[in-house]
């Protein structure tokens, strides 16, 4: 049985689905049981509880051979994940931790990446079986949660990283790798660096959206500092605005253009492409650009 923490976000449901497809029994720890039931497929055991409470984690992990460790984006992430690691120490359960962009995981990296670095150090030194997954930025986050709202609001794709590219990864590939890492001993003690098959620029993404919708999609140039100021004016907490400013500057410096073959090495399948993902999402772009359902017949 595998315990999944952070099962209802952008990545967790894909981890659950990949585990179920491999015949694994899956349990999730959820504060909101109804939300978990709606977000996850049938066949998942939902254990009510709070990852901040060691007793809840201990009860949920009873009988588990592996734990997928993910927690919400926040400035208390390290406190929560380190508490979970301490709780599970000496249980022998394998902890698969989802970390951040590999080039930023260092003591002087951006806010959340500094926390990932600290957690990785403690986990590796804990004596607990572990695997670390360092994933580059998710297609689902950049495209669905950043580009779609920006297109809806301004009609353009804002570009804070200039001519640099990012080897974006599909969260479904992360889920597949996580399932293999938690179930297969061969990955024990390793840090797997997960990327898409190539680095793409914002201009490339805008052109592909245009190709899918038949429209000219402009790119609006901005800066990492401009993103930070915009976030602050929208009420984002200062620590998070600072984090995104630092991350976009890292991207602008071309530090996330690197590509690895770890997805294919682990899953024996090539990593999904941005082009394929944008084709899947073409109707969402068409809808916000005023084309309604005109693309459905040609999909």
Image (cartoon, rainbow, N blue to C red):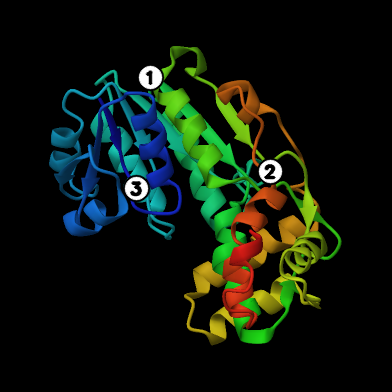
Judging by the rendered image, the residue that carries numbered circle 3 is: 6
Q: Which mark is residue 103?
A: 2
- At a point 83% along the width and 57% down the height, the residue shown is 164
The first of marks 3 and 2 along the sequence is: 3
Q: Secondary structure at mark 1?
A: loop
Of tags 3 and 2, which is closer to the observer?
3
Res 242 seen here = no
Please state the horizontal and vertical placement of residue 278, each as a whole percent of the image: 66, 57
The CA span between labels 1 and 3 is: 23 Å
Please state the horizontal and vertical placement of residue 58, each as a whole percent of the image: 17, 34
Q: Which mark is residue 127?
A: 1
Residue nearest the observer in this picture, 256 or 113: 256
- Residue 163 occupies quadrant: bottom right
- At a point 83% along the width and 65% down the height, the residue shown is 162
The CA span between labels 3 and 2 is: 24 Å
Is the residue 62 above or below the residue 230 in the image?
above
For the N terminus, give its image quadrant.
Answer: top left
Is the residue 40 above or below the residue 227 in the image?
above
């Amino acid at each position: 049985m595998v315990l999944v923490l952070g099962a209802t976000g952008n990545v967790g449901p894909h981890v659950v689905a990949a585990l179920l497809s491999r015949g694994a029994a899956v349990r999730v720890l959820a504060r909101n049981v109804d939300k978990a039931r709606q977000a996850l497929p049938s066949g998942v055991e939902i254990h009510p509880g709070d990852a901040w409470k060691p007793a809840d984690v201990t009860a949920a992990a009873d009988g588990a051979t592996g734990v997928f460790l993910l927690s919400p984006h926040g400035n208390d992430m390290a406190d929560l994940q380190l508490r979970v690691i301490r709780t599970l120490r000496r249980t022998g359960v394998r902890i698969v931790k989802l970390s951040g962009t590999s080039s930023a995981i260092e003591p002087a990296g951006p806010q959340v990446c500094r926390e990932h670095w600290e957690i990785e150090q403690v986990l590796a030194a804990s004596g607990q079986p572990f695997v670390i997954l360092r994933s580059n930025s998710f297609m689902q986050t950049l495209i669905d949660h950043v580009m779609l709202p920006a297109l809806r609001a301004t009609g353009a794709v804002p570009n804070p990283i200039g001519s640099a590219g990012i080897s974006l990864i599909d969260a479904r590939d992360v889920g597949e790798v996580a399932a293999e890492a938690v179930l297969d001993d061969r990955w024990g003690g390793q840090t797997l660096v997960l990327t898409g098959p190539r680095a793409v620029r914002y201009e490339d993404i805008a052109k592909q959206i245009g190709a899918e919708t038949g429209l000219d999609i402009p790119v609006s140039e901005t800066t990492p500092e401009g993103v930070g100021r915009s976030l602050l004016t929208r009420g984002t907490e200062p620590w998070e605005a600072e984090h995104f400013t630092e991350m976009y500057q890292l991207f602008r410096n071309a530090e996330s253009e690197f590509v690895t073959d770890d997805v294919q090495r682990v899953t024996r399948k090539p990593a999904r492409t941005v082009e394929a993902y944008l084709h899947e999402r073409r109707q969402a772009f068409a809808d916000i650009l005023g084309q309604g359902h005109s693309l459905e017949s040609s999909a």
